[in-house]
Image (tube, rainbow, N blue to C red):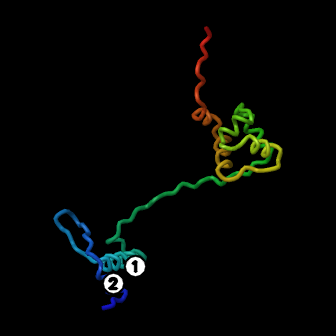
Amino acid sequence: MVLGGEEMIRAFAYLKISKGVENMKKQTYYESIMEGLQQAVDFKNGDTSKCRVRTVTIPAIEPLSEYPKEKIREIRHKTNLSQKYFAELVGVSVRAVEAWETGTRKPTGSAKRLIQIIEKEPNIINAMVKPEKPQISI
């Protein structure tokens, strides 16, 4: 016997959909999917009585800035970091920072976002810098 699409869906195991501890109802996958689709149609038509509606506010994220060579150097100088430490902070090579500051390359992706964060909140680097161990002289 060959089952068609609807019969195959109905032939799957039953799902238990809990509607409270004492009120359990068995549904096939097909019935569960059809019920969900009907709820979606009802929701689109304005009936939210059978739906759980959750409103989520997504904050607007500031677009990435462009960073010309002068701006990179200015941000790095404001943080009092050498190219080596700035590169380590941003997670790139020293050559990348050199290339940014000479204008042969521009920062991209996550490096741009990190530079933007450092530009807006320069003190954030304090969270990334390990405190120096005191040197003991004998």
Residue 56, placed above or below residue 117: below
User: In terms of sequence position, does the residue under pointer 1 or pointer 2 come before the other?
Assistant: 2
Residue that protrudes farthest toward the bottom in the picture: 1
Determine crowd level at label 2: few under 14, some 14-19, many 20+ residues with C-alpha closer than 10 A.
Answer: few
Q: How crowded is mark 1: few (under 14 residues within 10 Å), some or many (20 or more)?
A: few
Q: Is residue 70 left or right of residue 93?
A: right
Task: Name the residue rendered at 33%, 90% in the picture.
Answer: 2
Task: Decide if residue 24 is on the left or right side of residue 77.
Answer: left
Q: Which of 96 and 125 is in front in this view?
A: 96
| Residue pictured at 20% horizontal, 69% vertical | 24
Q: In this view, does 70 lie above or below 34?
A: above
Q: Which image quadrant: the C terminus? A: top right
On the rendered structure, is 57 left or right of 25? right
Query: Mark 1, mark 2: which one is toward the viewer?
Result: 2
Can you name the residue that lies furthest to the front here?
Answer: 1
Q: Where residue 67 sits: x, y (%)? A: 75, 48
Amino acid on which the number 2 mark rests in the picture: Met
Rendered residue at 51%/57% (across/down)? 58
Question: Badge 2 is on which residue?
Answer: 8
Q: Position of residue 13 (x, y in %)?
A: 27, 75
The amino acid marked with disc number 1 is Val
Instruction: Residue at 46%, 59% (x, y): give it.
Output: 56
Which sits in the foreground, 132 or 103?
132
Q: Mark 1 points at which residue?
A: 41
**Where's the N terminus, which quadrant?**
bottom left
Label 2 residue SS:
helix
Q: Position of residue 92 (x, y in %)?
A: 69, 44
Q: In which quarter of the image is residue 86?
A: top right
Residue 6 to residue 115: above or below: below
